[in-house]
């Protein structure tokens, strides 16, 4: 089973995935993240997120995420699925739909067209951790290493949330909305119950 986690900045996905991976330790789990998760994909991640590359345009950004995704699929996700592992992935194509398709205004169709390869390998289940961007940004603001997208305006992050709402409307059978304004334990337990029902 291939499960992805989505949400805006500071939605707590990374801690949640750690918690869930520990709680489901009896399963053979591969937990990974996008953009990155392999050497080449991590290099692409640096180009797309390092604030020193301030000239990255929206189309280039979308293509870099798609490239990183293709590499990560071939190196990490597809081999793990073939080996019957439970794959937990921090972000996938829905991030591109919400951030590049909606917030950057490139449109869902464009994002889908450059992500054809990912469309052959869609997740069985996606958890969207929904929180108010003001709360999410207040959780991460103390960090020293804010990346190029973290540094975008609150207006941009509000648009990302609207983009995720459109993702929810478009894929109601695959994407489950989770209220992110609760403790990690509460959120993780809700998610673990849903995963166990589906396994
Ligand atoms: P990351 O540090 O992983 O953020 P988070 O901890 O919030 O998941 O950085 C990933 C950033 O890349 C995040 O701002 C969202 C953005 N992103 C896109 O814009 N499009 C994409 O397709 C993906 C995978 C990520």
Image (cartoon, rainbow, N blue to C red):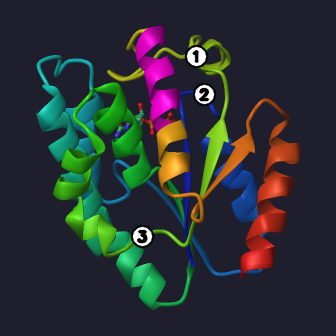
Q: Earlier in the sequence, mark 1 or mark 3?
A: 3
Quadrant the N terminus occupies:
bottom right
Residue 92 lies in what quarter of the image?
bottom left
- Crowdedness near tag 1: few (<14), some (14–19) or many (≥20) residues, C-alpha within 10 Å: some
How far apart, in angstroms, are the residues tagged by discs 2 and 3? 25 Å
Asked if the magenta segment contains residue 147, the reply would be no
Q: Earlier in the sequence, mark 2 or mark 3?
A: 2
* Visible residue check, residue 43: no
Q: Quadrant of ligand 1?
A: top left
Q: Secondary structure at mark 2?
A: loop
Q: Earlier in the sequence, mark 2 or mark 1?
A: 2
State the residue in front, 45 or 65: 65
Question: Quick one: which residue is furthest to the bottom in this view?
Answer: 83
Write the residue at 18% across / 29% down: 58
Q: Secondary structure at mark 1?
A: helix
Residue 25 as seen in the image, left or right of residue 98: right
Would you name the residue on which mark 2 appears?
10
Decide: marks 2, 3 in contact (CB < 8 A)?
A: no
Q: Residue 50's x, y, as percent? A: 27, 26
CB of residue at label 2: within 8 Å of ligand 1? Answer: yes
Decide: marks 2, 1 in contact (CB < 8 A)?
A: yes
How far apart, in angstroms, are the residues tagged by discs 1 and 3? 29 Å
Write the residue at 42% across / 70% down: 122
Would you name the residue on which mark 1 appears?
137
Label drawn at residue 40: none
Query: The magenta stretch spans which residues?
Result: 154-164
């Amino acid at each position: 089973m291939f499960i992805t986690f989505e949400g805006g900045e500071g939605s707590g996905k990374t801690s949640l995935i750690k918690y869930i991976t520990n709680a489901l330790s009896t399963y053979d789990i591969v937990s990974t993240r996008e953009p990155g998760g392999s050497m080449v994909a991590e290099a692409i991640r640096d180009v797309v997120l390092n604030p020193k590359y301030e000239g990255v345009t929206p189309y280039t950004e979308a293509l870099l995420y798609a490239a990183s995704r293709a590499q990560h699929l071939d190196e990490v996700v597809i081999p793990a699925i073939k080996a019957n592992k439970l794959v937990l992935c921090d972000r996938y194509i829905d991030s591109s739909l919400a951030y590049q398709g909606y917030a950057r205004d490139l449109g869902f169709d464009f994002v889908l067209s450059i992500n054809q390869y990912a469309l052959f390998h869609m997740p069985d289940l996606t958890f969207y951790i929904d929180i108010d961007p003001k709360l999410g940004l207040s959780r991460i603001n103390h960090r020293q290493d804010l990346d190029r997208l973290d540094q975008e305006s609150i207006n941009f992050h509000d648009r990302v949330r609207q983009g995720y709402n459109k993702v929810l409307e478009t894929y109601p059978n695959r994407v489950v909305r989770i209220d992110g304004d609760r403790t990690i334990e509460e959120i993780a337990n809700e998610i673990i119950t849903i995963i166990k029902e589906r396994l």
